[in-house]
Amino acid sequence: MVAELPPLKWSRATFDGLIRHFKFPESWGTRYPYEGQTAADAPAGFITLFWDFFSAGNF
């Protein structure tokens, strides 16, 4: 049985703030997810990063 993942709940402002705060290089090609996407929907060549990695996980 495969569990369904909930849709991502980030706001665009939160995403943009994360990129600025942690100074992600433009070369990383970060993308804001499309509405309804889940963590499992990262396109080929991309990875999913979770806010908690940065805010609570000292990533």
Image (spheres, grey):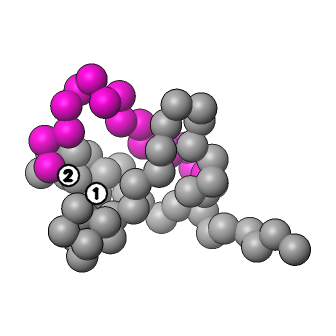
Give the left or right position of residue 40, taking residue 47 as reference: right
**Is mark 1 in CB contact (under 8 Å) with mark 2?**
yes
Instruction: Say which quadrant the N terminus sits in.
Output: bottom right
The residue lying at 41 percent from left, 37 percent from top is 31
Instruction: Tell me where residue 52 sits by quadrant.
Output: bottom left
Neighbours of disc 2 within 10 Å: few (<14), some (14-19), many (20+): few
Is residue 20 left or right of 51 when viewed as pictured? Answer: left
Residue segment shown in magenta: 22-37
The residues bearing labels 1 and 2 have C-alpha atoms spaced at a distance of 5 Å
**Residue appearing at x 49%, y 37% in the figure:** 46
Quickly name the residue at label 1: 14
Q: Tell me which corner region of the image, top left, top right, bottom left or bottom right, holds residue 11.
A: bottom left
Q: Around disc 1, counting alpha carbons within 10 Å, would you say few (fewer than 14), some (14 to 19), or many (20 or more)?
A: few
Taking the image as drawn, is residue 13 in sight?
no
Image spot of residue 38 (x, y percent): 60, 57
- Residue that numbered label 2 is attached to: 17
The quarter of the picture where the C terminus appears is bottom left
Majority secondary structure of the magenta segment?
loop
